[in-house]
Amino acid sequence: DKQRNVAVLPGDGIGPEITEEGVKVMKQTGEQFGYRFHLDFGLVGGSAVDRLKTPLPEETLRICREADAILLGAVGGPAWDRNPPPLRPEKALLGLRKELGLYANLRPAKLFPGLAQSSTLKEEVLKGVDLLVVRELTGGIYFGEKHTEETKAGAKATDTLVYHEHEIERIVRRAFEWARERGKKVTSVDKANILESSRLWRKVAGRVAGDYPDVKLEHMLVDNCAMQIIRRPAEFDVIVTENMFGDILSDEAAILTGSIGMLPSASIGEGNRGLYEPVHGSAPDIAGQGVANPVATILSVAMMFRHSFQDDEAARAIEEAVTRVLDRGARTMDVAAPGHLALSTEEFGDRVVEEL
Amino acid sequence: DKQRNVAVLPGDGIGPEITEEGVKVMKQTGEQFGYRFHLDFGLVGGSAVDRLKTPLPEETLRICREADAILLGAVGGPAWDRNPPPLRPEKALLGLRKELGLYANLRPAKLFPGLAQSSTLKEEVLKGVDLLVVRELTGGIYFGEKHTEETKAGAKATDTLVYHEHEIERIVRRAFEWARERGKKVTSVDKANILESSRLWRKVAGRVAGDYPDVKLEHMLVDNCAMQIIRRPAEFDVIVTENMFGDILSDEAAILTGSIGMLPSASIGEGNRGLYEPVHGSAPDIAGQGVANPVATILSVAMMFRHSFQDDEAARAIEEAVTRVLDRGARTMDVAAPGHLALSTEEFGDRVVEEL
Ligand SMILES: CC(C)[C@H](C(=O)O)[C@@H](O)C(=O)O
Ligand SMILES: CC(C)[C@H](C(=O)O)[C@@H](O)C(=O)O
């Protein structure tokens, strides 16, 4: 029986608008592939702070724990930028990742046909780009001890980057598993000429590689990678890296898809449960106007079918529907050619549903 | 009297080849502008490890302390990649930066006429690009306490990112000073939604901005900046950021110049003494072939005249000579159009000398 519980957390800014399109596509796909969905809606981020004085209410965490998958819109915005750390919207993301043990963040970047003109990179450079950034999500400097103290010479702020061998091992192993299904190449990114944690990372990656003789491993320094990702992007297959480097490199890789509005993500742990969200933020400047690009969210729903429901066929159905809609020239504002009519968020979602 | 002591540290890989061209241009410029140079050559990096079992010999440090300026080629290479940390070539860079108090690293990126075709970015995106990355160079995670320990659950590696208020203040202040002479805009890059050190950074930057009402300050998160630098590069003027973020973003910005072979850098402290080196590395794959691009080194010499000798006229003479050589179509291998003859390192250096 294909009964699934899905927690839906629309969040802030454009979050509600794009989530609505994601849910629409999820329901339609579910109908075609015989799923029965039970949806639980929860507050998260700034809107949760406003109503319940916390970015991640207990009730939200509860429905997420009971869910097979979580669809999240976006959190944050200038309204909460001056909040003290515990009341900051993005605390909700960190809390969900940590509480649910979602240590593997997947950010695939590939160019959809017809979108090269929206990228700032030359079309010939984008040819053949199909990369997957695998970012460690529950360790590193995001979660290490941090504090600020007053000294006689003024304030002193400290952050700590910690990695345990087993944290590196499990994420690198998954990167190799995925590479096996793809281009059979893993680029492990670190700063081993400076950081102790990177030297451990490199050592563990080398050891794990021994179990995957069919997959090629290369090590790359993060500064060089930031350059190579836009210099010869088609040469990458799977990039695996620690939390902060992954944050930076995956945003950079958004350029390869024409718009950050195209980039989906999945955050998963040991079981099948996962959290699916667009890579882009809450875009407060365009919130409420119905012009946001829902593609990243819709593709995140595809990743939900693939990773949480183990249903590659349904995932591909969604991805192909998006491709066909784009092929017909439909575009939201962010990727529309100058002088061309842009569709609204809702219209674009409807087109995808029709194509399904 | 224009008597100057310059320490020359060729280093490893292509280091000696490109340094030779830098020295040639320095001497010629010195002759024209009435300088008398005393040059001291020193061992550094892997070649110092091989001969003296340390990447930064006492004697090298001594000539650097006595110098008005230091010209460095590049350090590192696969021969020393497996060395333990104290015997790693890049330790020399860290040692020089710290010992000489060179806390401000300047990496200007602009496109030379005719080089747009060598960039992977579209020509119209590169129009008007002229940015300066100001990287903090003696603090942050590069110099914080670091160690690896064995635990029952396996190894655990720790790095520490520390910033003192005064370290942030002095670098941000210099960024504002430079912005005043340029486009009057400072983008301060941090990860203030996660890091304590970034929250302090943002606070101090905001306070310093108060002393520069004629310069605009914007704050940007590092992940977003990694995207914006290639999405709308012409909108940046001065980017100021901490050590590790600056390392990543300035390598990325190399794409804007067509080749990392074009990017010079200056590292300076409180006085006029500075260290000048290309941003690129030692490129062991092409070392000894005489095909490396000497432009980054030659432009680093221009920065030496500007920052250490306070001689903007001589600096501009070098920059204009390089522009004219490029204008005439002369190219080294890395930026030559397919099918066009590439000049050797030495030939290119000679052309610049002729143009001076
Ligand atoms: C909002 C922020 C905390 C978050 C992160 O840095 O992880 C975001 O940039 C992301 O990439 O999901
Ligand atoms: C070689 C390395 C230690 C160095 C750094 O990270 O600072 C280099 O990448 C640079 O940017 O000068």
Image (spheres, coloured by chain):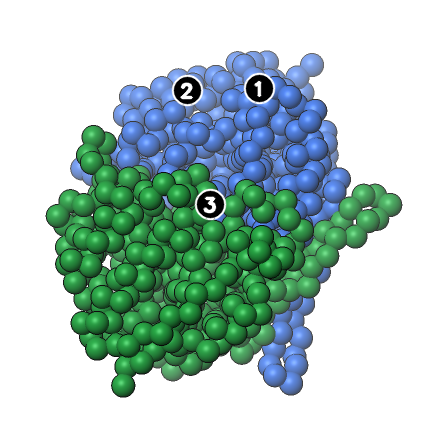
Chain colours: A green, B blue
Per the rendering, the mark at residue B321 is 2
Q: Report in which chain the residue with disc 1 lies.
A: B
B77 and B260: which is toward the camera: B260
Query: Can I make out residue A52 in this image?
Result: yes
Q: CA distance from mark 2 to mark 1?
A: 23 Å
In-image side of B34 versus A204 (left or right): right
SS state under label 3: helix
* Pointer 3 residue: B224
Q: Report in which chain the residue with disc 3 lies.
A: B
Q: Residue farthest to the front?
A: A51
**Quarter of the image containing the N terminus of chain A?**
bottom left
Mark 2 or mark 1, whichever is nearer to me? 1
Residue at (55, 33) in percent of width and height: B218
N-terminal-most mark, 2 or 1: 1
B8 and B170: which is toward the camera: B170
N-terminal-most mark, 3 or 2: 3
* Pointer 1 residue: B181
A181 and B29: which is toward the camera: A181
**Quarter of the image containing the C terminus of chain A?**
bottom left
Type of the residue with mark 3: Asn
Type of the residue with mark 2: Ala
Residue B184 vertical position relative to residue A260 in the rendered view, above or below = above
Q: Residue B280: percent from the left, percent from the top?
A: 46, 43
SS state under label 1: helix
